[in-house]
Image (cartoon, rainbow, N blue to C red):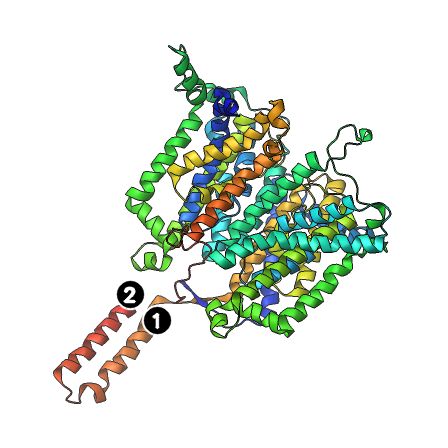
Amino acid sequence: MFRITKRDKSSISDSLIFRSFGFAVGIILSMLLILLLGYNPIASIAALFDGAFGSLGGLRNTIKFAIPLATTALGLSIAFRMKFWNIGGEGQLLMGGTAAMFVSLIAGPNIPGWILIPSMLIAGIIGGAFWALIPGIFRIQLRTNETLFTLMMNYVALYLVKYLYHDLWRDRDPAKFNFPGIKMIQQQAVLPNVFGISVGIIVPLILAFLVYILIKRTKPGYEIRVVGESEPTANYAGMNVKRIMLGGVLLSGGIIGLAGAVKLAGETMTLTDNLTGGAGFTAIVIAWLANLSAPFILVVSFLVAGLEQGAQTMQLRLGVPAAVADIVKGLILMSFLGSEFFLRYRLVMTSVIGKNKRLHSQMKNHCDDPNVSDVSATRSAESDLTDDCAVRDEKAEVR
Amino acid sequence: MLSILTQPQFIASAISFSVILLLGTLGELLTERAGHLNLGVEGMMLLGGAIGYYAAVTTESLPLALIAACLGSGMGAFMYGFLTVTLRVNQNVTGLALTMFGMGLANAVGSKVAGTSTPVSIQAYFEYQPFHIKNPANELIAYIDRAFLSHDLYVYLTILLAIVMTIFLFRSREGLALRLTGENAAAADASGIKVTRIKYMYIVIGGMLCGLGGLYLPLVQQGSWTDTITAGQGWLVVALVIFVRWHPIKAIFGSFVFGALSILGYSVQLNTTLAKMPIFNQFIMSMFPYILTIIVLVITSARKKAWGGPAEIGHAYFREDR
């Protein structure tokens, strides 16, 4: 039989072995499902990887997908460090995009880009931070469950954007034949491309560095980690838990809002209810897989973005529905998550008979110890001891 | 406004809309009572819907469609259970991964039967309305009939299920064991309840109920499969469970309220004076269920003594933990 015990610490090589094993299991399960669905599994997976990383164009698209994912995951990682379960990435992304869109809409066409772009990005930060602040305040003051609160805020934001899209901000230009939609952002507000990649790429790169320094090397970062480990400890150490948590939540939401603004200005050019493309949810899994570590978040985001890009190639080349990418993504994520178990716990083989024998011999030594039984101790003490031994024997049998 | 709300057609369509939510809510409620927040409801509803509908179209048999839906969503729930119960992975993250997986598999399976409508032989089951009154004696009875009694068996069985589940949860030993597991898994374990078995069982049954809810969408309500047919109703279910405070009877009324709110936006569009007011915009109206849930969350957390749901939610139980 097996018994599960906790591991003290796992080495990096262990972590690598188990994670690659998890990845392999995910790929194999995906291939089985693809086969069951009636497509060629090997060709599909090959097309998936080739499409994502095999060509310059594919690589560019992968990076394009990775930018919002990485930025959002970096923002989430700060909240997760405090054990503030911010599931509201979708909403914060949307509100960041909405705020940036608002600035572009009210700004005249004469405002130069070097003023407009920063104002849009700052607006995005404020929008995202505001959307995280609402559940944050209730969490801090009333201990309202932030997982569910932030989740609900996603849908409030989603329907708000739908309302803006179909109604309030609708572009009623007759040339659009009454199709719903919001105007494009100002020409000068579009983020320029460098080598075919939006300059937005520097945002997650710089942020990863800053978040890393913040968490590992600064006092506020240390406080955030302590609050996450144990609020009573933080309190006892004289930290202002409420202030720290408020700061962390604002920072988390702000970074995610920035991701929304960057995506708006660099990729979609207008606000739609599909601005996020599910990035808010995917980023949660990314942050978790990367163990909340900023450099790893960049790596994992790149790989997950590769799955999304590769799926399109798979569809184009083999006619495999793009939905298969979600299957592969979901399965790889789940097997990755599952492999975590083996890093935290150990399976110990226990042979029932052998264990009983060992225990018995220990007991016997103890009970037969002449120093204990021969010494003319009082009667009560002696009976206590034999009872004790009987109990232990019984326990050994039970095991 | 009131005239819209009291129209028998409006009430009737709100009820048929709320069946999907109610089934999902009952399923998620069981899961959460066992101490597991499964954010994969959307994925499981889609899995049940797609696989069940695929079976319905290919076999033209309702029982097989129901079984296929249960198997599909039960498989998703089992994966979630394996990861969160046995492997003790974070529940939120696993649920989200399940939604991704479920959405992908459902859309891939569904694309094979897209464009085909529900077989006539199966439609016939749902045309049978057991309580429908053929010749109403007066206006009132006719009204009640059109609003409440002209539904298919699926609707009434779902409501019956909610009642049975209430009795099960609060009046049976098994129900007590389930609630204890969700409140304090260590205490349940110490009292001899097989915690792992209970968790697996209700996570999987819960998933199956979500899948049956998902099946009603393509099979009856829309009559065909479209990509991501649930369109966020799975998330509405997660909200509903909190809104009804983890209670099956309240879930009947809660899902009716949410169902009504979800279609009210469309009904109001027909009334030109109301449609012009921003508050009655269909998208603003769609926010209300979520805002209501937030209000419930805040109120219960403000009342210190109020019960805030099964205490074990989100925690992985490990016997050797202290």
Q: Is A217 drawn above or below residue B89 in the view shown? A: below
Outermost left residue: A379
Q: Position of residue B53 (x, y in %)?
A: 55, 31
Q: Nearer the viewer, residue B143 or B201?
A: B143
Chain to which the residue tagged by mark 1 belongs: A
- Image point (50%, 32%), residue name: B259
Q: Position of residue A237 (x, y in %)?
A: 50, 75
Q: Nearer the viewer, residue B8 or B103?
A: B8
Q: Earlier in the sequence, mark 2 or mark 1?
A: 1
Q: Of discs 2 and 1, which sits in the foreground?
A: 2
Q: Which residue is mark 2?
A: A398
| Apparent side of residue B296 relative to residue A259 in the rendered image (left or right) | left
Quadrant of the rendered image containing residue A377: bottom left
Q: Is residue A178 visible?
A: yes
| Apparent side of residue B197 relative to residue B234 in the rendered image (left or right) | left
Q: Position of residue A354 (x, y in %)?
A: 35, 71
Quadrant of the rendered image containing residue B193: bottom left
User: SS for tag 2?
Assistant: helix
Disc 2, disc 1: CB below 8 Å?
no
Q: Is residue B67 visible?
A: no
Q: Is B152 drawn above or below residue A360 in the view shown? A: above
Q: Nearer the viewer, residue A133 or B189?
A: A133
At label 2, the amino acid type is Val
Q: Which residue is mark 1?
A: A355
| Apparent side of residue A118 relative to residue B170 in the rendered image (left or right) | right
At label 1, the amino acid type is Lys
- Image point (45%, 58%), residue name: B316
